[in-house]
Image (tube, rainbow, N blue to C red):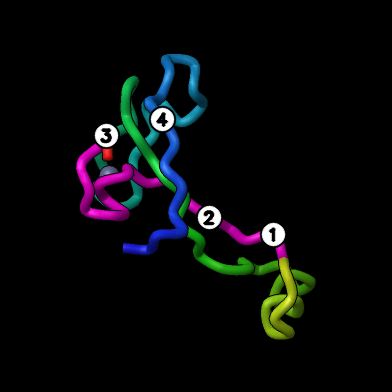
């Protein structure tokens, strides 16, 4: 597990990702879910790719997945 993962949740009914599929398990996010963000990288931005190459901070593309899908841990842990 990446201990840098930050756990978010539980989700409220007005959260924008409610009903969208988790990219790791394809189940829809629902009220009460705990999630985290998994960083993918700089994406197709030339500026962000350049910063990544040079070891500089950049705005990374990240995807939201269920907390257990990213960490293997139970929802509330
Ligand atoms: Zn999931």
Mark 1 burial class by Cα count in 10 Å: few <14, some 14-19, many 20+? some
Residue receiving disc 2: 62
Instruction: Specify whether 42 is left or right of 62.
Output: right
Q: Eyeballing the image, is 42 above or below 52?
A: above
Q: Which residues are magenta?
A: 58-75
Image-quadrant location for residue 8: top left
Callouts 2 and 3 close, C-beta under 8 Å: no
Q: From mark 2 to mark 4, how far is it between C-alphas?
A: 17 Å
Checking the image for residue 76, the label placed there is 3
Would you identify the image quadrant in which residue 77 lies? top left
Going from the N terminus, do you reach mark 1 or mark 3 first? 1
* Mark 2 / mark 3, whichever is N-terminal: 2
- Residue 27, horizontal then vertical, whole percent: 25, 38
Residue 39 placed where, x, y %? 50, 61
Q: Which residue is mark 1?
A: 59
Q: Residue furthest top?
A: 13
Image x and y of residue 38, in percent: 45, 56
Residue at the image point whose x is 49% and y is 23% from the top: 15
Please state which of residues 3 and 46 is positioned toward the viewer in this rendering: 3
Say which of 68 and 26 sits in front: 68
- The image's mark for residue 9 is 4
Cα gap from disc 2 to disc 3, whole angstroms = 22 Å
Q: Are marks 2 and 1 in contact (CB under 8 Å)?
A: no
Q: Earlier in the sequence, mark 4 or mark 3?
A: 4
In the rendered image, residue 41, in percent from the top left (x then y), is placed at 56, 68
């Amino acid at each position: 597990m990446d201990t840098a993962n930050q756990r978010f949740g539980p989700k409220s009914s007005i959260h924008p990702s409610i009903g969208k599929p988790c990219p790791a398990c394809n189940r829809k996010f629902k009220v009460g879910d705990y999630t985290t963000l998994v960083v993918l990288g700089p994406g197709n931005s030339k500026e962000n790719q350049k910063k990544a190459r040079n070891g500089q901070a950049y705005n990374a593309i990240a995807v939201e997945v269920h907390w257990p899908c990213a960490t293997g841990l139970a929802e509330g842990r």
